[in-house]
Image (cartoon, rainbow, N blue to C red):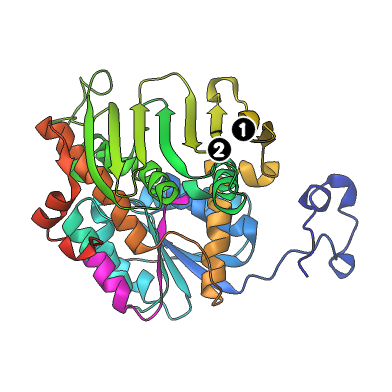
Amino acid sequence: MNKPRLRYFAEAASQQHITEADRYLYQQPQASHRLVVIGTGTIGQEHMRVASLLGRGQIHGIFDTQTHSMDVAEANFRAYSDQPLVRYPDLQSACNDPAADAIFICTPNHTHFDVLQVAAQSGKPVFLEKPMATNLADAAAILAMADSYTTFIQIGLQYRYKAQYAEAFHEVRTRGSLGEVKTIAVSEYRPPFLDKVGQWNKFNANSGGTLVEKCCHYFDLINLMAESQPIRLYASGGQAVNFTDLEYEGQSSDIDDHAFVVIDYANGTKASFSLNMFCHDFSEEMVVCGTQGRLVASEVFNFHQQQGAKAKLSIQSGEQGASREIDLSYAAVIEQSGHHGATYYEHIAFMDQLEGKQVEAATPLQGLWSIIVASAAQESLARGEAINIKEFMQANGLAGYLKG
């Protein structure tokens, strides 16, 4: 039976007289997996922090082509861990260290494919950050590799672990609170992309485009909720406000900052996605309507006021049954560790897979489908017309993934 961690008491100054011999509820788990993090920027450091917080895996080593990034990552790591940390001189040694059990790839999007080719030679389990690739050819090649890989590759689509979405799936799939799902509407309003090393995320060639880079999370959620194959979509959007004056190494930023996407699914479900990236704070929402009710899952993060994220779930049943609204939260120490707690539960799934357990973590196939929708939406933006998914996939050599 799992013991409660009771971190609040374990870390309290008044409880530090409890010696290691008397720690039971306060006892830290013994890390049984040694992890290597490739790429020590924002998300790489988040994974280092979350792995240490969970305690089932130890950050064994790090590698980044930018020495400054490794210096900062190690300094931040020392603030919460006294574990030894290997700094590798190159990618090959990082991926092939016999002392390491698994590899986390947290490098810029356009490097994922090449880094994975080296990591896969080790035969170790791999966590590959989203999006799995910046183009469909590379994504399909990764899926083909994963299908014959001796262990597993998990994709970093962690929004499915956010409290409001985890509960939304439970209401729809397990409790059947909405009956048969008919429409799905997802939206995100947020500030611009943050600064990155080399400003790689301001250019479509490096990121795959906004709808691939940022929104594959949401297309993953929509695909999961629809439980069907997309057949048609239309997108409208562009670059209205953000980075219109940004030039880097002679190139002008071309990243979109707003979009509207409408998706038709084979089972008749209709979905929409709205994005705005020139807002003052973060808010996102999923509205699902079915034959027996309406669900609203929302999250607001007012970072200017330095407030924690506020997540809610509302079930509106009318005369069909009880309506209710609940506030959702993870324990503060988990919620504050990254992506409002979703990364922590994503790590649990990865550790469970390492131990041979069945999980519902994002698979390369699901990662591919999130990019199919996102890439088709980018194509629709460019062409100004609706995209037939079957024709789009055939044109991109992906007909083998079509159902029916």
Q: Residue at x 62, y 26 (%)?
A: 307
> Is residue 155 part of the magenta span, yes or no?
yes
Query: For this rendering, which residue is in front, 97 or 290?
Result: 290
Name the mark on residue 317: 1
Up/down of 326 relative to 27, above or below: above
Q: Position of residue 99 (x, y in %)?
A: 48, 79
The N terminus - image quarter = bottom right
- Marks 2 and 1: CB-CB under 8 Å? yes
State the separation of the CA atoms marked 2 and 1.
6 Å
Q: Residue at x 33, y 53 (%)?
A: 107
Q: Earlier in the sequence, mark 2 or mark 1?
A: 2
Residue 197 appears in the rendering: yes
Up/down of 113 relative to 341, above or below: below
The C terminus - image quarter = bottom left
Q: Residue at x 41, y 33 (%)?
A: 185
Q: Which residue is mark 2?
A: 292
Magenta stretch, residue numbers: 141-158
